[in-house]
Amino acid sequence: MLHICHLSSAHQAGDIRIVRKEARSAVRAGHRVSVAIRGQIPADCASVHHVELIPPKGGRLGRFMLLGWQAYRAALRQNASIYQFHDPDLLPYALLLRVVGKRVIYDVHEDVPRDILSKEWIPVALRHPVAAVFEVFEDFAARRMSAVIAATPFIGERFRGINPSTVTVNNYPFLEELTPPADTLGSERSGFCYVGGISAIRSAVEMVDAAELARHRLMIAGQIETQALQVALQARQGWKYVDYLGTLGRADVASLLARSIAGLVLFHPEPNHINAQPNKLFEYMSAGLPVIASHFPMWRRIVEDYDCGLCVNPQDPQAIAAAMIMLATHPERARQMGMNGRSAVMAKFNWEQEQHVLLDVYSRCGANELCAE
């Protein structure tokens, strides 16, 4: 049995990938698992030992300077077999753990250098220099990790040339979590849904405008990025077609998907989006819901190869509205697309298969079969 300690200063204790998927999978495999993270662990994850991190005052800089140190101190107290960290903020502390002889895994959720190019809080003139400097440092640190776990194949390809002990553990959904509830089977579907972070670069404005053009309800669940964006969305004509549901629990998300015609996952063509693999795409598919997705090449391959939805220009409300109308007026075609997506998740895009890759990394790392210690 190994003791695996997860570290995150940026995520919350209800994080699906860190806590519900990776941590619980390791517990079920017989390992002891600790998670140092902000917030309270959900009741259904009580088998995971929780070390709560208390966010300091001082905003982003305070989190980087003080919460990272707090996570490092918590890590040392755990004296774990393996440390797995999930934030680029923690790279300096991951290197410190390596210096004192610990086995450390870098779990890379995002293509951070490309993500930096879209950060509004960084002045435009500084984004490319900051991204370039960070990429050099990230490569330096990743080369010294015991292993790297990438959340998408694109990220995996990048790091495989830096650290040969790189694997991809896709953030696919659980097979049964979002299966339509029994009391919704056969019920009439109406309206379209979007579940996730609500931001301008995730086509929030375009979705609201498309709802007005299509004259269909749009149900949005998640946290709106800023107060200014919320005010701007509410001022648009299309807002009268929107049901804003706030943040929902997983059971309520399943219920929402079960009564919707299709799910929207429309990201702008930002550098970190084009080769991303959004979890929501596969969650919609797992719920038997057709998708309306951005027309990026990688997304299009999935959607068209499995015939599970439609791809459109995410910055064109007219195109989004046309896709909504098509699915609403062809319910049998939409139902077949939803069934196709569900079949693809059952066969390939599910966590139950991905967890075996993760557990193999733990076994090899615990047996010193990865990077030299």
Image: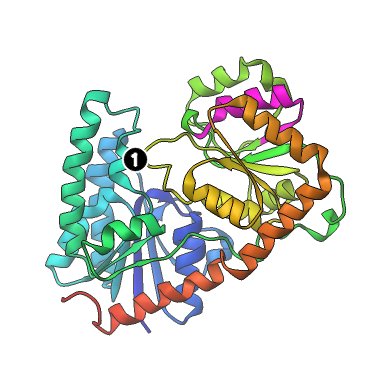
Residue 234 appears in view: yes
Q: Which residue is mark 1?
A: 115
* Quadrant in which the N terminus is drawn: bottom left
Q: Residues within 10 Å of mark 1 (few under 14, many from 20)?
A: some
- Decide whether residue 207 is among the magenta residues: yes
Picture mark count? 1
In magenta stretch: residue 239: no
- Furthest residue to the left? 99
Left or right of 180: which side holds 222?
Answer: left
Amino acid tagged 1: Asp
Question: Where residue 354 sits: x, y (%)?
Answer: 49, 70
Height in image: 321 above or below 278?
Answer: above
Q: Quarter of the image holding residue 139?
A: bottom left
Q: Is residue 326 left or right of residue 66?
A: right
| Residue 174 in which image quadrant | bottom right
Q: Would you place residue 1 above or below residue 212 in this image? A: below
Judge by depth and name the residue closer to the eye, 197 or 62.
Answer: 197
Q: Name the secondary structure under disc 1.
A: helix
In this orientation, which residue lies closer to the viewer: 267 or 8? 267
Q: Position of residue 112 (x, y in %)?
A: 31, 45
Q: Quadrant of the C terminus?
A: bottom left
Q: Is residue 283 above or below residue 274?
A: below
Q: Which residues are magenta?
A: 202-219
Residue at 29 percent of width and 78 percent of height: 365
Where residue 334 appears, x then y in whole percent?
76, 47
Relative placement, left or right, of 100 versus 67 is: left
Can you give x and y, in whole percent of width and height, for residue 123 in the image?
A: 26, 24
Closest to the observer, 17 or 281: 281
Secondary structure character of the magenta stretch overall: helix
Task: Judge from the rendering whether residue 76 lies leftward or rightward of residue 247; answer left or right.
Answer: left
Regarding residue 178, the answer to whether it shows in the image is no
Q: Residue at x 45, y 67 (%)?
A: 23
